[in-house]
Every structure is written in C-alpha cells, then in structure tokens.
Amino acid sequence: ADEKKKLMKEKLWKLMCTYLPCDVLSLQKSIVQHVEYTLARRRYKKDKGSFYQATAVSVRDRLIERWTDTQQYLSSKDTKRVYYLSLEYLLGRNLQNAMSCLALRNRYAAALEELGYKLEELTEEERDPGLGSGGLGRLASCFLDSLATLNYAAWGYGIRYKYGMFEQRLIGRAQAEFPDFWLKEGYPWEVERPDVQYLVKMYGQLEEDGKDPVTGRPRVNWVGGEDVIAEGFDIPVPGFHTWNTNNLRLWTSKASCEFNLGSFNDGQYYAAIGEKERSEPLTSVLYPCDNNAPGKELRLRQQYFYVSATLQDILRRYKKRPEHSLLDLPRKVAIQLNETHPAIAIPEFMRLLLDEECLGWKEAWHITQNTFAYTNHTVMPEALEVWPLPLMEQLLPRHLTIIYEINHHFLGEVRARWPADQGRVARMSIIEESEPKLIKMAHLAIIGCHRVNGVAQVHTGLLCSSLFPDFYEMWPQKFVNITNGVNHRRWMLQANPAMSAVISKWLGTHDWIHDLGLLARLKDLSSNPELQRDWQEAKMYNKRKLADFIKRECGIVVNAAAMFDVHVKRIHEYKRQLMNILGVAYRYLRILSLQQEGNTEALGQMVPRVVIFAGKAAPNYFVAKDVIKLVLAVAGRVNNDARIGDLLKVVFIPNYNVSMAELIIPGTDVSQHISTAGFEASGTSNMKFCMNGSLLLGSRDGANLEIEQSIGKDNMFMFGANTKEVDQLRRTINFRKPQMDGRLRWVLEEILSGRFGATFHDLVNSLQPGNDGYMVGHDFGSYLEANEVVDSIFKNPPAWTTKCIDSCASMSRFSSDRCIREYAEKIWQVVPHQFKPPGKVANVD
Ligand code: GL4
C-alpha cells in the first residue's frame, strides 16, 4: 500500500510540475480549449469577446505557474515581504502587459492570426478595471509592476469594488455619470479564493474583563456588533522578463450568515438573510473623489473592513512558520500605507497584537512603528482625512480606546520635550478638540510609522515646513522624499511601439527597456536629421491614430498636422483646466479680431492647434462640472465657426481612463500641467508625456520642477508664480486686489455677454480679485506668453524635435524602477530575490 501511495504521489508531482508548452500550436490549442470548455462556447458562435476571454485565461494559466513557483520560492527563502496597502489601483488593461512580461507577445499574435484574430483587436475587448480615481491609484499599479520586475517579494492589497470609477458621458454639453459595472463579462485575470476568508467585526460594545494575568493590563472585550466576511480575489502581477510573479489580493465583502448558523436555529432566518443585504454593499462602490475625502461612514467601514482582512492575512502568513516570533516581525514584514486611506491599520494592528496575540503595549507599539510607513500624496486641506470621534466610537469602539492610548503616550513625549508648550500639544494631538471632536488620520499615521514620505522634492518640503512642521521638528529623520515614477514599459513600450522602435533602432539595442539610463545616448544624436525624420514619422503615426479616435468618439475632424495640445487629468480647480479654456477662448477672440482688422500677416503666423481635454469631475463637485460645461460650450462655438477653420479646434474626450491615456499620450505635441504652485503633490502624467516625446507647458509645481532640472530649462515651457509667491498671494488675497490682466477681462466680458451660450456667472465670479484662490488671474498673462513661445518653436520642426528627443532621453530618473529601489532602500530595507526558472526560458519576443 505504501508503494502504491508513493507512486501516486510521484505521478501527481510529475503532472503538477510540468509546465505548459508555449509553442504556437499549443497556444492555439489552449485558446480554443478555453473557448470551448471554460466559456462553454463549443458549437456556439465564437466572437472577438470570447476569443479575448479565452486568450486571457490561456495567458493567466502561464502566469499562475510562475506565480506559484515564486510564492513557494519566497516562502522557502523566508524573505522579508513588502505589503502595499492602497484603496485604489488603476491597473489598465492586462493582456498586452502580461504577454510582454512573459515574452510571448509575438507568439500569441501569430497564434491568433492563424485563427483569424488580430491581437490588437482583441486587446480592445478588455475593459479597464476602474478601481481607482486618479494619479494615486495609477501610481500604485506602476509600483506593483516595478516591484515584480525588480524581483521584490511584494503583495498589493486592495478592494474589489463591484462598481469602479463611474462612466462619464457627455449629455447636453455636461457630464453625466453612469455606473461602471466592470465585472459584467467577468474578469479573466482574477482567481477567487473561497478558502481565504476572514471575519471582520464592526459596531458593538466594550466590556471590561478584569486584568490580563500576563501583562497586568486591564482587559476589554469587544462584544456584539456585526460580522462581515472578507473573501480574497487574487490577480497575478507579472514582472517583465523575469519568472517572478507577485500578487494583488483584492477583498470583497460577503454576508457572514454562513458563520452565524445559530441565528437560523433561533428562528432568525429572515434576519440572517437581511444581514446578507447589509454586508454585500460594503465593497460595492469606489468613492470617486481625488484629492478630497468623502467623509462618509460607508467609506470608513470600507477602509476598516479591508485593513482588518489584510492584516489578519499578513499575520496568518507570518505565523505559519513556528520559528517566527512576533517581536521579529519588522524584520520580515514592511507595510506601506498609500495615503491615510488605510491608516486605521495602525490601531487595528495594535488591537490584533494586544487583544488577539496578548502582547504588552510596549512590544506591540515597537512592532507596529517599525513595520509601518506612510506616504503622503496631497497637501489639499479637503483631502486630509478626519473622522468624527462619535462615528469612530460607534463603529470601532475598541480602536478608539487604542487611539486614545497612542495619543496619551505620544503627547507625554511632546510634553516631556517641550514642557509648558500647550499650543504645541494641541496642534500635534491626534484629536482635534472641535465640535464634534475629530480624529486626524495623518497625525495617527505619522505617529504610528517609522517613515513618512512625500512624492516630489517640493512636496516633501511643504510637508516639513507647512503641513507637519511640529512633527518634522520632533522627528526630522522620519521624513524622506521619494519622487514618484512611472512604469516606462507600459507607458513607452506598450503605449508607443512606434517611438520605441525608433529608440531601439538608434540605440542599436532593446536594453533601454531594462535600463532607462541608456536613453541618454540619444542626446548626442538628437539633431541628426535622419533620427528626426524617424521620430517625426512615429509622432505623426500616433497623432493620426488619435485623430481617428477623436473622430469616432466625438465626431470632430481634426488635422493631424496641427499642434496637439493636451490637458488630461481629473478636473479640479487647482489643476486649472479653467485657465486653459480661458486661454483658448482668448485665442479664438484674437483670431476673429485679427480677421476683422485684416491683419493677414499676424494670422499667417498663427499655429493651428487642437486643444484636447479629458478627465472626470467628482459627481458632487459642481465647480469642476461647470468647467466641463465651459469647455464644451467654447468647443461648440469654436468648432462650428467657419471663420476659424483649422486654426483652432477644441475637443473634450469623454470617459478618460488608463487605456485611453495610452492612446492620447503618444499622440501629443505639448501637454499641460498647470496646477497652482504648491497644490499638485507630484503629478505623474507629466512624466509619461515627456517620455513620449511631448513638451511640457507647466507651472512651477510638483515634479514639473524636477523634470525641468533633468531635461533642462530650455526644453520646458514654465510660467507663473512659484510656491512661495503663491503662499504670499494667498495670504494677502483679501486686501490686495490687483488689476486684472486686460486679456482676461476681455475673455470674461465675452463669456458674460453670452458669446459662448450660457454666461457662467459663478465661474467668472470665482476669478474676480479677492476670490481667485488658485491664482488664475495672477498667472494668466505669463501663461499666454508661454503659449506664444510654444507656438514659435513649433513652427521650427527641427528645433522642436531636438527638444522632444533631448527631453525623452533625460527621463530615466522618472521610471518607477528608480522609485521602487529608493523605497526598498530608504524605507523597507529589502533586497531582490529572483526565482531561477527550471531549464532555459526562451526569450521569444
Ligand atoms: C495625488 C496627487 O494629487 C498627485 O499629484 C500625485 O502625483 C499622486 C501620486 O503621488 O497623488 N494625491 C491624490 S489624493 N491623488 C493624486 O493623484
């Protein structure tokens, strides 16, 4: 019997350790099998949608092999792991990325071609999972990609929202929101883990329960309340040309009635089913606010639900090894908080260590502080999360007592160091003594973490000098800067194959894909007319693609020879889309007045422009929605005015998302990053545009400043007040009422006169001296002048192209690879661990 068992085991092992074949015929078989058996489409109509799904599952099969190998290897090595906690991920489409990571893109393309499908077309079938609202979520996804590529043992944790970021449509020249049910056709990249479930408790009361016999601390029991189940869904995260494959685990909420069978026996059948109704909506919807805290109870419940499941999962994994002692946890676990959204993790981790693991306060606090780190991504006051204390007390009574205790110990330290400085104590407290009292999550995060980082130099400077100066004074070594970066493999190689081919041709190698520093060699060649011709051809190809898309999506015909001037990002007052559209209106009025004057010379000098906007406004952010209305109104007037012709076109592309960005960015000549200085923490699309050979028109804000340092002043169109000046101007806004720029006054008068349809009183009023907190009026003149410089250089294609190539060639610093290495070194203290695959892996792409 033993022999039989052994043979069975060997057989099983052999079968399980056989890797799937990757030759063209095998790929075809696997795709067709998935169409027939996974999707159950045998003998039914087979279409693009099912071939996309089947191809995705076929790729996923191959990812899963690597993923299990990697996870097993990392466990056997007992490596330190990084856990990235983010409430948002903007993954973008997976198919192309996964195929190029596996180096199987060409083979899949060939396999599909013979079956009558074009890979490019199937790619279009994939729907973006909109599990994030803007730059912060996209950054998290770039980080996951780089972590895997650089062979760091890292997992992402997040929420599997049922409805992602809303779908934006333009109805009656205004934004309308529709639910984004991204899972409608299923999501082939995920693996449900019914075996990975945790109970998460909310509400209830505290009961005193004597003293802990070991620690002597008063013991409290958290009783009653509601339980919700968190169930994990895993998405493999492949590294580029490495076997290592990491994991993104997303939680979904389920009713806990399966756990509460008792209530059925009590005749509570309907009550138990009712609980199901209550639990499931928990992870239904993503709050679509960027740089703004929704302050809703449901949001706090989502945050806690997700954090609790995540920490239970991390602890379970850590404790699986009997030799692991909790005191050593920071040597094996690093947890990064992406903004304060998951900051409730600090008291939750304390609770788990104190109440479930029975550690003493000192040990628990030491472990917590050394495990967690916090990234701040915004200085916007409305985005700094605070929770009313009564809400916290009701939802998480145990956590509130822990927060009190953290605050008590912390303020003790402050008092010891600055005796009799009551003002400082009040400023630094986690609790704001307002009515109602508020819990400041940023303070909790700073106190509970060993590192706090900003995301660009100027932003980190502001954290230390303006936002958290008391904390900086107390713990200067806690604060570090790590300037953001983006995944150049997605944003150059995948999004812009035409330009990538030119780069590889002129460098004579593809190695830049691994080491972006190699791009610098292009600088010596940037004025070479042949390289310039290749470069311009690639740009023109991308612009034509974008023009086709604009025609399809918006019904507007644009001339690909015109300058494509692009402003795409969330709509926010501080991002100043308003300044852009006012500049456009000015250009329009000026063209008409030159025509009236008969000034043909000046008209002949004008550069035809297509001004392209895209971005979503939060559904309840009415000023931002008004800005969209104004853009559409100006577009309606300009595009339908026969006198203007090709000199000016205005386009608003609806429903901006990651895959659309991949199309727009490569087709851009000049892109706008014109936030009021001091408000955009970093910006990341500025980096993507620059990597794609577009020039930046930018304000002195965020990462614009560092990009300028890297690419050189001459390659960037900078304008407007800097952070210091803005700070001064805002301080004096109520009594210093400067004269308005004449050109701005003209535009506003025309708007008020109804020239563009509606009169937009509120927007116009927001720009009057004294109201203009985002300094549109102050910067308008220098903005128009910078635009003139843009025009004058665009008229000289060799000069323009040299700048584009030089800028692109200087962007290596802005790869998320560099950024992740800095996190690894400055914060997480981790090193790469690469799994060496069995046998030789053919690099077939
Ligand atoms: C943001 C910042 O607004 C943005 O400047 C930054 O690039 C991004 C990633 O660090 O984080 N903060 C919030 S909140 N949303 C963002 O996009």
Image (cartoon, rainbow, N blue to C red):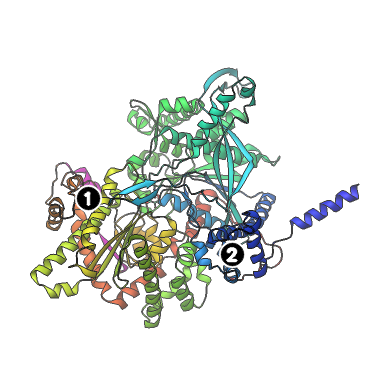
Residues packed near mark 1 inside 10 Å, few (<14), some (14 to 19) or many (20 plus): many
Question: Do callouts 1 and 2 mark residues in contact (Cβ within 8 Å)?
Answer: no
Which of the marked residues, 1 or 2, is nearer the chain's N terminus? 2
Q: Which residue is mark 1?
A: 775
Residue stretch in magenta: 715-734
Q: Is residue 219 above or below residue 529?
A: above
The relative height of residue 404 versus residue 556 in the rendered view (above or below) is above
Image quadrant for the C terminus? bottom right
Q: Position of residue 768 (x, y in %)?
A: 16, 47
The front one of 812 and 609 is 609
Looking at the rendered structure, the secondary structure element under dot 2 is loop
Left or right? Give the position of 760 relative to 417.
left
Q: Is residue 726 magenta?
A: yes
Q: Given the image, on which type of amino acid does mark 2 rest?
A: His
Residue 587 sits above or below residue 463 on the image: below
Residue ID for mark 2: 241
